[in-house]
Image: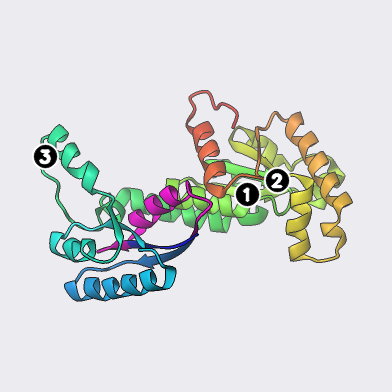
Amino acid sequence: MKRTAYFVSESTGITAETMGHSLLSQFDTVDFEQVYMPYINTEARARALCQRMDEAHARDGVRPVVFATMLDQEIAGILKAGDCFYLELFEHFVEPLSVELGVAPSRKSGQSHAITKPSHYTKRIEAINFAMANDDGMRPDNYRHADVVLVGVSRSGKTPTCLYLAMHYGLRAANHPITEEDFEHGDFPKEIIDARQHVYGLTIDAQRLQAIREERRPGSTYASAERCRRDIREAQTMFKRHSIPVLNTTNQSIEEIAAQILRAVKSPNGASA
């Protein structure tokens, strides 16, 4: 089955896309063509979108699904009258919440991603700069200033996870790739050991690691099955020696890995991830 799904908003559409993706993920037998439609903030744009929805219905043989966060009732009315299955994501929550709080909603678009607290925004920017400046072991002397230091073999997911933690949670995240020099020495560098209360290890199944490395350096020793198994085995020995909590990234998304690390960081006793 194929369906077209639109993520529609009068602002950035980030909320509609995020919530829509979460809902669609529950229907993995359906092939969704996903269309991102931000800034539908005039009646003319709404009518143009309705025309696109008509075309999608004619092409697919079924009406498209629309996930919307539209606070302008007139524009929302145009879309609801279109040839679609329309889901207003705020509709069932804003009014009941208003009654409970005893406060009328502002009905201003873009509020969920606006810079309402400049200090929080500044913290996130600083965290992103920190993650980029301390990627791939570039500044070991900064590990002591990090909220999180991710350690793992090459291509185990350290860099994207660090950036996600910085962008979404404002954490200063650095990462250290376990190098041939570390393997020859049989241990992590002193900077990692000194900062180990903030260190989390990432591991990955050897077969998956080989596939990732093969894409990067086809036919190389670096991508060989034997090298991948050795790297993972020796890294695990080093993690165990220093009681570093370890997360397996093989079947986990960046969001899932980050959520586990965040939970560990916020745990009063620094519980294992």
* Residue at mark 1 to residue at mark 3: CA–CA distance: 45 Å
On the image, which quarter does residue 44 sit in? bottom left
What residue is shown with label 2?
152
Q: Residue at x 82, y 50 (%)?
A: 228
Marks 2, 1: nearer the viewer: 2
Q: Which mark is residue 103?
A: 3
Asked if labels 3 and 1 touch by Cβ distance under 8 angstroms, the answer is no
Which kind of residue does numbered mark 3 sit on? Val
For image coordinates 65% across by 44% down, the residue present is: 249
Horizontally, residue 62 falls left or right of residue 194, namely left
Q: Amino acid at mark 2?
A: Gly
Mark 3 Cα shell of 10 Å, populated few (<14), some (14-19), many (≥20) = few
Which range is magenta?
A: 8-31
| Foreground pick, 255 / 263 | 255
Pair 1/3: label in front: 3
SS of the residue under disc 2: strand
Residue placed furthest toward the front: 61
Q: Nearer the viewer, mark 2 or mark 3?
A: 3
- Please state the horizontal and vertical placement of residue 156, each as a whole percent of the image: 69, 50
Circle 1 sits on which residue? 175
Q: CA distance from mark 2 to mark 1?
A: 8 Å
